[in-house]
Image (cartoon, rainbow, N blue to C red):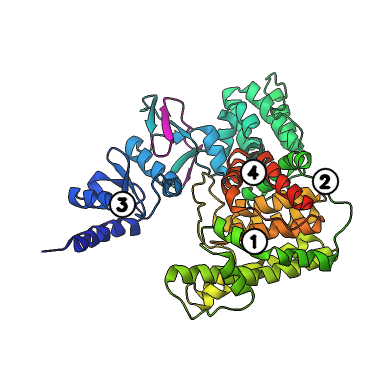
Amino acid sequence: MATPKEKLAKSLEVLQTLQKNGVVAVRSYDLTRTHRERLIKNGFLIEVMKGWYIPVRPDDVTGDSTTWYASYWGFCAVYLKARFGMNWSLSPEQSLLLHVGNMRVPRQLLVRSPKARNKVTALLHDTSLFDTRAALPKAGQVAEKDGLRLFSIPAGLVSCGSGFFLQNATDARAVLAMVSDASDVLALLLEGGRTKVAGRLAGAFRNIGRDRIADDIVKTMQTADYDIREKDPFENALNLILPAREQSPYVNRIRLMWQQMREPILKQFPPVPDQPPDTVAYLNAADDIYVMDAYHSLSIEGYRVSPELIERIRIGDWDPEKKENDREHRNALAARGYWQAYQAVRESVRKVLSGENPGTVSGDDHGDWYREMFGPSITAGLLRTADLAGYRSGQVYIRRSMHVPPRYEAVRDCMPAFFDLLREEPESSVRVVLGHFVFVYIHPYMDGNGRIGRFLMNVMLAAGGYSWTVIPLEKRGDYMAALECGSVEQDITPLAIFLGRLVSDSLVT
């Protein structure tokens, strides 16, 4: 007779087969009742709604939303296809967000279908679906992305409401920048005689510097004997020239975010110190607080380290071959990697204090920080040598965050653009806040992004004459909430205030 462990192993084999076949949303009939109940009981399966489940890790903390956010879009694609077949689409507004790579999980996903019941379907972690009987995009105006049926970009722009341009200004401008010619948009405007929408889109294209497209819309509608009145749907003008041809919509989004977020930072951050710091004194001061910095930065990421362990590793009193258990060994390797990375960052700080451009320095050196940080884990055999190759080659999710970082293919475009922005930015405070924020927003590595992002922040602080600043573990909740607000709500003010106060305190002390 099989033991409980053997029975569970059999059920896990069945679940693993489903996952290998790409199943994200598990339906009741995908598993026998015995397997399903066993997997639920042991924490490997959780019910989303009656008859629908997602695989989870049994060691996930109760109430942890990470697995759900990671599964969200895949689950919705499967569920909506099962319910509506091919006769559905997401709303025009949500379609446009996805076209520019904004994969954040919405509180409520709006879905259109002739079969809709105008009903809210509750999902996990305070998310839901609302299906409504509204017009679908016509044939040829549908785009499909990872199983999600979307309005095409032209159809989405013509069908979305004016509020989209106010509530999602960055994304709206990014999607407008993806339109290279007025033809596709004009065909829809002329077909429906959409004069008000035509005036709004003409104003929107002119706002981002696409005067040729704006003029084509206005002149063509007038030639067709429509009375068109151009109106800018955005609240303010754009002080940025977007490239006419851009490889990745993510890049334009980052440029637009940067432009949008500069002013709030300038209002909230403390002024640059009057006297530039002495290089030797600055580095000595950073060395003096290294143990505290390492303790808090590693602890924020969930490592269990003590100041005593960090100090032992700093002075070399550590044998990488000696370990009491895997957990302690991993913590020690993380501490050793942090120490090695700090040495590389210290040299970067020396460069910016001598007057080198901090954007150029961090762009050239951040790969060294990453390699040093994970070198000990490579040596110990916990990671593959290939893991040091560079930017991630897969999707990554941030624990408990509704923000989904860019696809790995987009990272190759985003990172050079990010360092260009750092290099060109004249204001120290903006480099500090957005240097940290945009780095972790992109999340270019599979691991270590928070630690490297805080190192990057301190290189920017040094370049501006500010003191090395530690983000304390006891303020982790406020810190993560501020990052989430910037990523999901596009509101950088909480992070600017949070970091500004820490920097002010470090200047006082």
**Viewer-side label of 1, 4:** 1
Counting labels gives 4
Residue 327 lies, with reference to residue 492, above or below; the image says below
Cα gap from disc 1 to disc 3, whole angstroms: 37 Å
Q: Of label 1 and label 4, which has the lower sequence position?
A: 4
| Residue type beneath disc 1 | Met
Q: Amino acid at mark 4?
A: Met
Q: Which residue is mark 3?
A: 43
Residue 155 place in picture, x, y as percent: 55, 34
Q: For mark 4, give the secondary structure.
A: loop
Decide which of tag 4 and tag 2 comes sooner along the chain: 4
**Disc number placed over residue 58 in the picture, else none:** none
Locate residue 370: give its quadrant: bottom right
Point out the tag, 1 or 2, that comes first from the N-terminus.
Answer: 2
Disc ID at residue 292: 1
| Magenta-span inclusion, residue 483 | no
Tag on residue 271?
Answer: 2
Residue type at mark 2?
Pro
Give the image quarter of residue 494: top right
